[in-house]
Image (cartoon, rainbow, N blue to C red):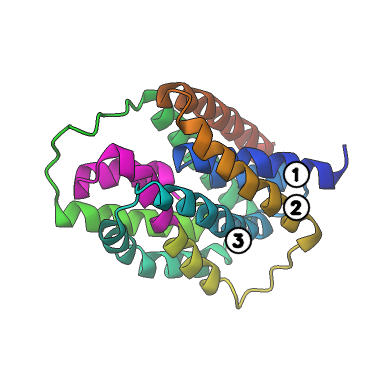
């Protein structure tokens, strides 16, 4: 299979994850770029930010049209992560490829386990909002986005529910707003680096990811969240094992 075809397939999977769960897409994008398309870890994490911004914008529009975005809560959450995202973006460019790969494998494993173990609470569950918890979670998510080029939706969704009392029905859409803000800042921080990107592969990747995001939003209304989380969680654990093995051998 050609690199172009692989980019199309990988992009569709990333879009489906982001559109249906508001999480997991960028964590799939980085290993796909490295292992399927031959990007270096630095190139992959930078390209992932571009892909995440494009696909998250598409998914955000779909959720906003359905009234499933809490704009004020999302912007407050994102504000706490902007400086950590910028600082981590600058630091990431200075680290060896093996360190980045192992860090990403660990994050993939964590995301996979959280997806497999998480139970989606009903919208009626009462949650006590906490400004300090929201700020801490927002800062952590910003740092993860800047350092590894991922959106961090798997961190944002439960944090929005627990710290800002966002209903679960709106948490996915709101997490996309946070992802976009952090990814834009992280990408700007990397603008001065000498990373070269292969746009001939990135553009088809983005194209099918955008289409997949729309399909993912529709899929989320037809398939139980627990089933989707189980599928993507298992995939993320597999990705983590492959990346860790490749970095250590």
Q: Along the horizontal axis of the image, is 76 left or right of 195?
A: left
Q: Does the segment drawn in magenta span residue 191? A: no
Q: Position of residue 104 (x, y in %)?
A: 54, 45
Counting residues from the start of the chain, the first of labels 1 and 3 encountered is: 1
Residue closest to the eye, 234 or 8 = 8
Write down the residue under mark 2.
204
Q: Are marks 2 and 1 in contact (CB under 8 Å)?
A: yes
| Above-or-below relation of 47 to 172 | below
Counting residues from the start of the chain, the first of labels 2 and 1 encountered is: 1
Q: Position of residue 177 (x, y in %)?
A: 40, 57
Q: Does the segment drawn in magenta span residue 167? A: yes
Residue closest to the eye, 40 or 158 = 158
Q: Which disc, if any, is residue 50?
A: 3
- State the extent of the magenta-drawn residues as a range: 152-179
Q: Are marks 2 and 3 in contact (CB under 8 Å)?
A: no
The residue lying at 20 percent from left, 50 percent from top is 164
Whether residue 28 is visible to the viewer of this picture, yes or no, is no
Marks 2 and 1 sit apart, C-alpha to C-alpha, by: 6 Å
Residue closest to the eye, 19 or 136 = 19
Q: Position of residue 234 (x, y in %)?
A: 53, 24
Write down the residue under mark 1.
8
Q: Secondary structure at mark 3?
A: helix
Q: From the image, which quarter does the C terminus lie in?
A: top right
């Amino acid at each position: 299979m050609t690199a172009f075809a692989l980019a199309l397939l990988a992009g569709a999977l990333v879009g489906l994850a982001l559109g249906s769960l508001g999480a997991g897409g960028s964590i799939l994008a980085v290993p796909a770029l490295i292992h399927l398309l031959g990007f270096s870890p630095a190139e992959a994490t930078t390209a992932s930010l571009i892909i995440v911004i494009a696909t998250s914008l598409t998914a955000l529009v779909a959720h906003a049209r359905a009234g499933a975005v809490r704009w004020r809560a999302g912007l407050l959450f994102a504000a706490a992560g902007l400086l950590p995202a910028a600082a981590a973006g600058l630091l990431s460019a200075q680290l060896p490829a093996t360190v980045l790969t192992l860090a990403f494998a660990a994050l993939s494993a964590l995301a996979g386990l959280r997806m497999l173990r998480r139970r989606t609470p009903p919208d009626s569950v009462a949650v006590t909002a906490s400004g300090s918890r929201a700020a801490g979670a927002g800062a952590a998510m910003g740092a993860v986005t800047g350092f590894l080029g991922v959106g961090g939706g798997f961190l944002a969704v439960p944090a929005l529910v627990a710290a800002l009392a966002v209903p679960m029905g709106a948490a996915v859409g709101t997490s996309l707003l946070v992802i976009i803000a952090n990814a834009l800042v992280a990408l700007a921080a990397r603008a001065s680096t000498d990373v070269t990107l292969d746009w001939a592969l990135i553009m088809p990747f983005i194209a099918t990811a955008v289409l997949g995001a729309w399909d993912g939003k529709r899929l989320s209304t037809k398939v139980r969240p627990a089933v989707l989380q189980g599928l993507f969680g298992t995939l993320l654990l597999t990705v983590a094992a492959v990346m860790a093995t490749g970095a250590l051998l």
